[in-house]
Image (cartoon, rainbow, N blue to C red):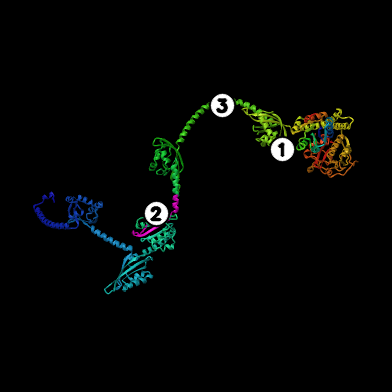
Amino acid sequence: MSKRILVIDDEGGVRKVIQISLEAAAGWEVVTAASGAEGLLKAQQETFDAILLDVMMPELDGLATFDQLKSHETTQHTPMILLTAKTSQYEHQQFIQRGVMGVITKPFRARHLVAQIQTILNWVS
Amino acid sequence: MTYPIDDLDKTHEQLLAEIEQLRAELGDRKRIEEDLRRSNALLQAQRETSVAGIWVVNEHREVIFHNQRFCELWRIPQSVIATNDYWLILKTALTQLQDPDQFVARVEAVYQNLEEISHDEIFLKDGRILERHSAPMRSSVGVYYGRVWHFQDITERKQAQEALRQSQERYVLATRSARVGVWELNPQTGEFYLDPNIKSSLGYSEIELPNSCEAWFSYCHPEDQAAVFEMSKACVEGHRSDFAIEHRVFHKDGSIRWLMARGTALQDEQGITVRLIGTTTDITDLKLAEQALRRSNAMLKVQQDAAIDGILITNENQQAVSYNQRFCQLWHIPEETISRIEHDRQLRETVLDQLTDPEEFLRQIDYLNQHPEIIGRDEIFFKDGRIFDRYSAAVKSFEGDDFGRIWYFRDITDIKQIEAALRQNEQKFLQLTQNIRDVFFIAAPDYSQMFYISPAYEEIWGRTCSSLYQNPRSWMAALHPDDQAQLPPTVKTVCSPLEQSLEYRIVQPTGDIRWVLARTFPILDQAGQVERIAGIVKDITDRKRIEAELKQYQDHLEALVIERTTELNQINQRLQKELKQRKQVEAVLREAERRWRTVMEDVRLLVIGVDTQLNITYVNPFTVEVLGYTRKELLEKNFVETLVSPQNQIAAQTYAQELLIQQVPAYFQRDIVTKSGETRRVAWNITQLRDSQGAINGLLGIGEDITERHQVEQMKDEFISVMSHEFRTPLTAIHGAVDLMSDGLIDLQSDRAQQLLEIAAEGTERLVYLVDNILDLERLESGKVGLVKRSYDIGELILRAIDLMQLVADDAGVHLSVSPFSFSLQLDGDLILQVLTNLLSNAIKFSPRGSTVWLNTQLMNQPIEGEQANRFEPIEAGTLSQPAGTLSQPAGTLSQPTALENQSKKLLSLPFSLSFSPYILFSIQDQGRGIPPDQIEAIFERFQQVDVSDSRQKGGTGLGLAICRSIVQQHGGYIWAESVLGTGSCFYVLLPALEPA
């Protein structure tokens, strides 16, 4: 069964690239949101198998969006993965300690993105 | 008789004649002798029968004759008289005399004067009086041949004379003292006799007061004459048989005398008064005495009333005759009541109710009344608690007659209470003195009497108290011989008025020696004289023993000290040497410490010392400067509590404890909080401090304030993080797009491929912009790019900037408003254009759609001094003299200035001191969200943006304003911003309008 993925990123180009990558490389259904607020709305309205969050977003950044998703009963069990351009392993550890399932560093290749998501979420290929 | 031998020569006739003559003489002599014998016999008879004692002594003091009466009178024993020894008899007589010397002297005097006929009296020891009469004996021819002594016992006569004399004397004295005189009147003849005593008592002589009634009456007081006359007349006329009248007469000295005249009429058989006789007695004294008595009674009454004692006088019949007011008060008897009491017993019954023992009261009264010789003294107890002292004595006349009894009553209730209190105090005193172990005594100043000695004396002195009472000085006998001599005389004799304290030994009868400490002090009387001495003697034997032991121990210690001192001296010498060496070392250490301290004091590093409890023990001046505290505020404060933020205190405490035991690295970076609350980043290097034994007793931290560097690193980290993100974001799009296309996942001819290509191109453009900005800023700040200044018209630059940003403004829906301006200035036109476009770009970026951005340019005057310093006002066109440039209205888009724009034309307050004028001021004003005050300066720093996310939404890297500032500063100008949150911001660029000379 195809996975439904919610991608939340303020960068339109990146958002598009990720959407096309996941659809083309994994055949997953991808829903995008251009802001943390939009992402929260969509996550609560629809069911997703995973949520990809960009860390650096204006107003409601990725971590704040993550916290709110975690506190909401409809979304708290949805696995979430952070997308970040920061390469600091220390910061990645900080993210993991907050409860995210994993951290993926930008940039990434499409197939690698899918593989990392599958590995993190333990989805059988 | 002898004849001389020479008579033998005479003749016979002569001899016969002589013999005849002799015969005749002999016959005569015989006759004479016969006569003489008869005479002698007669004389002898007379003498023998004479009542007088007769003693005849010849001229040779030979006893010729004595009669029996002489012997009887002089009680000469027969044996003595028989000796006829004048001197023996005389001696015998002398023994009976009261004054034998006078007797002898008188005798001798008589014998000396042979002619004297003496007559005197001799007083014998047995009370007899002899009359002595002595006459010389002479012959018919006058030849002295002795003396005859007559002695006659006149004792009875003398006694009678004496009695008579005394009687007379008594009579005279009596009459004189009684001033009584007799008088007699013969009414028939009118003869009047008045006793001379009366006359003399009145001071009159016989002549002055003759014996006549008239004369007598003339001296009577006029007021009494009639009464006396009538009384006398009544007796004379027989109306009365006697009379007695008191009347006054005038004394010769003019005073008045009172007389009591008594008279009795002597009547004949017919009852006719033939004589009046009587006595007159001077009763003046009596009258005066009466007056005095009345006065005395009155005074007595006053004294009685004033007396504090109640006084009652009862007569011999036990009736109350006198009392004073106090008596009534004491006995609660109203005066009107007591005056009606007729009998003493009634008085008693009135008061008996008040008494606790009325029977005893009555018994005592009766006893005293029955024994007037007894002076009563007792106490009376009342039911109401009062106590009276009763004193009673009999009242007697001078002759000893019992007149009654006087009773004194005094309320001694208070005295009794005081006595009871005194007794109680004395009891307490005794209790105290009986129980204390010290001897307490009270004695006379010279110890002649011991008034009190406490029982402790027996224990300490080993002698009885009674022995001391009997012999008050006996305590001194117990003094140790050595101390006897040492004691000052004041102890032994009179006590000094000052307190004394002495230590001495006493020897008990058992031989035991006790040490005592005697403290004496004088008790002074009201005159300040020492009346008694009191003292306390304490047994200090134990203390003395201990002192002796201590002394012994002290001596031993001193010996040890001496011994040790010698050792110490040797050690001291050694130590001196070591000290010298140590001083040298210390000098070196001090210098090292001085250098170290100088370093610590002067170094621009934080130096903080703490103890094992992390209390600050040392801070250097730089630390004080950085932290903002005073040294005093820091010392002894806990480092963690004072300088570490609350959320980090637990970790800091733990780390510090681990540092103390050297479990963690001693180099680390930690934040500390200043007094103002500012957080400073410090790179610490910690050293353990140790004491002389090597034990850790604290930490010394040397820290470098790396706050700015840390901030810069943080900013750099942040920038790198931002840059990383900025680079990676477009790279993600590019990389992803290219990867999808190259990986065959996307049909290259599809619309998706086209989208991916556009995404890649856009990302590439973004990367180029980013790289250009970074490179521009680096070049500007490194000085590798120099200014290329030429003359530009400011207005044209402005218009060009407007042109460049117009499209962006249109896309953003923001209106651009520019005020016309024209001024020529030497500047790098491209860079200034870059500044203007950058500021316009920011303004457009942060302005909402439909808002306006104003670009205003002004030429400003020089600064005004004083309060208006740094406040500048715009210069009207044409008023500024300048070597180049014209002010004209350029062509271009003009719009009306808004209210915010008008502010730029007011007096402008610069946030810095300006060093040049005039100048050009650019102001770019927007209606955006505004800039928080804490970022108004920071936005000009590298990599600073109001919001980091602005770099994605708004574009930009946070380097634009840093680039603008660098360009403006290189032109010698200033750039700053002012903002109101929620309203908008205004950025100012100020450039010098004239080239510096």
The front one of B963 and A85 is: A85
Quarter placement of the C terminus of chain B: top right
Q: Position of residue B367 (x, y in %)?
A: 36, 56
Which residues lie in the magenta part? Answer: B392-420
Same chain, labels 3 and 1 = yes
Q: Residue sitting at 33 percent across and 63 percent down?
A: B178
Return the residue at label 1: B677
User: What kind of residue is marked 2?
Assistant: Asp
Name the mark on residue B378: 2
What is the C-alpha distance between the residues marked 3 and 2?
91 Å
Q: Chain of mark 2?
A: B
Q: Chain of mark 1?
A: B
Residue B337: in magenta span: no
User: What kind of residue is marked 3?
Assistant: Asn
How would you rate the neighbour count of disc 2 (Cα within 10 Å): few for under 14, some for 14-19, many for 20 or more? few
| Residue B390 versus residue B702 in the image, above or below | below
In this rendering, the label closer to the viewer, 3 or 2: 2
Q: Position of residue B298 (x, y in %)?
A: 41, 62
Location of residue B691 by image quarter? top right
In this rendering, the label closer to the viewer, 3 or 1: 1
Return the residue at label 3: B572
Name the mark on residue B331: none
Helix, strand or loop status at disc 1: loop
